[in-house]
Amino acid sequence: MSIFVKQNFMEMDILKASIDWAKAEVFSSKISLLLSIIFFLAAIGFWQLGKTAMAKAFVWPMLVAGVLMVAVAAGLYFANNPRITQFETAYQTDAKAFVQAETGRTAKSQHDLALVFKVLPLIIIAAALLIMFVDTPLWRAIGITTIALMTVLMFIDSNTGARNMAYHQQLLSEKQ
């Protein structure tokens, strides 16, 4: 295989990896939207079928969690969907600068995700303490819903982190 063909193949490989990463993030946004629908359906179910004070207390926390999940889904979608087309343009313009910029961005994302995995468990602990020490139905519902929401966010971010790590490693191997 000639050096030109090998180099061209490696270039296409990193561009394909970049586009695949962005598409996977867009897919993750759709999963987040689906999960937000589950929170909304739970809120509607508690509103329509809830007979106890505890069941009725879940309506607003579940609605808020659903709205927050919609915000997460929108953020993932609107941040990553344009990248699918922008990656090819940026790569064709200056491949080396593209790889450098993406390497820096993915390194920052890894740092941010590490912080997220320290903060979300702390929020879960605070919510658990809220459940233990506050006896009103609304605050317990807020605590339980918060734990559910933070767990879902950790699920989403764990997949994002794994994709980001693999993509970052591909970018680093491209730089060499």
Image (cartoon, rainbow, N blue to C red):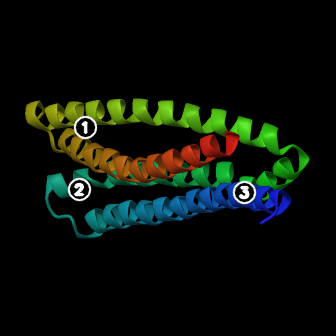
Q: Residue at x 80, y 37 (%)?
A: 97
Q: Is residue 126 above or below residue 17?
A: above
Circles 1 and 2, Cβ within 8 Å, touching? The answer is no
Q: Residue at x 90, y 47 (%)?
A: 93
Determine whether 41 is above or below 151 in the image.
Answer: below
Name the residue rendered at 57%, 31% in the picture: 108
Residue at 57% over, 33% down: 107
Residue bearing the label numbered 2: 56
Q: Residues within 10 Å of mark 1 (few under 14, many from 20)?
A: many
Image coordinates of residue 62 in percent, x first then y, are 34, 53
The foreground one among 98 and 39 is 98
Dot in front, 1 or 2: 1
Residue 96, percent across and down? Answer: 80, 40
Answer left or right for 45 relative to 174: left
- Above or below, 135 against 27 in this view is above
Q: Nearer the viewer, mark 3 or mark 2?
A: 3
Question: Could you tell me if residue 60 is visible in this image?
Answer: no
**Viewer-nearest of discs 1 and 3:** 3
Residue denoted by label 1: 124
Task: Kindly tell me whether residue 37 is visible in this rendering.
Answer: yes
Q: CA distance from mark 3 to mark 2?
A: 58 Å
Secondary structure at numbered mark 3: helix
Characterize the local packing of mark 3: few (<14), some (14-19) or many (20 or more) Cα atoms within 10 angstroms.
Answer: few
